[in-house]
Image (cartoon, rainbow, N blue to C red):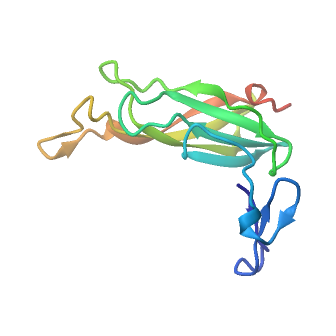
Amino acid sequence: YVARLPFDHPLNAWSFWNGSSWSENINEIKPVASSPSSSTTVSKIKNKYVMFTAEFSLGCDGGKNIYASTSDHIEGPFSEPKVIYTINDTVQGHYPFFYLPIAHPDCINNKNELLVHYSINGYEPCLINCRDNKLDPEYYRPKANRVPLNLLGINN
């Protein structure tokens, strides 16, 4: 869903995308894209809007892929989600619960790669995260990867 508000008066009336135009009636709002999970963010990267999402999981081995969908407009339509990265954070063959891929458009390197980070949140119930009241810091932390812009359909 997409909503907009006055930048200098955020408490004033918002408007909502209804599939063809902006409306002040929230009951008319329509989705602009679908996603495999609720762990979704949208960023403007150069000339495209890119929606990042992760496979839905609530525990270990629930998913390992990060997806992206693109659009020329914030109102969509967005392309079908495609895998842009498969996490490699395994412990004893298990993938962690992970979430919230976030792009950093200000961190495009000289190879035209975008920095995208995500958070891992442990390997339970597959592995024990806490032993003797101590957590392994590797089991709960932000991670990052570089994604080539051309993989996202963004021209250099």
Q: Quadrant of residue 84?
A: top right
Q: Position of residue 5 (x, y in %)?
A: 76, 71
Name the residue nearer the viewer: 30 or 56: 30
Q: Would residue 145 be found to the left or right of residue 1 on screen?
A: left
Q: Quadrant of residue 36?
A: top right
Q: Is residue 21 above or below residue 25?
A: above
Q: Would residue 49 be found to the left or right of residue 122 on screen?
A: right
Q: Residue at x 18, y 44 (%)?
A: 134
Q: Residue furthest right?
A: 21
Q: Residue at x 24, y 30 (%)?
A: 127
Q: Quadrant of the N terminus?
A: bottom right
Q: Residue furthest front?
A: 27
Q: Residue furthest left?
A: 132
Q: Position of residue 148 (x, y in %)?
A: 71, 27
Q: Is residue 38 above or below residue 96?
A: below
Q: How many marks?
A: 0
Q: Would residue 24 be found to the left or right of residue 67 on screen?
A: right
Q: Residue at x 50, y 26 (%)?
A: 87
Q: Quadrant of residue 107?
A: top right
Q: Quadrant of the C terminus?
A: top right
Q: Position of residue 95 (x, y in %)?
A: 39, 26
Name the residue nearer the viewer: 90 or 16: 16
Q: Position of residue 73 (x, y in %)?
A: 85, 47
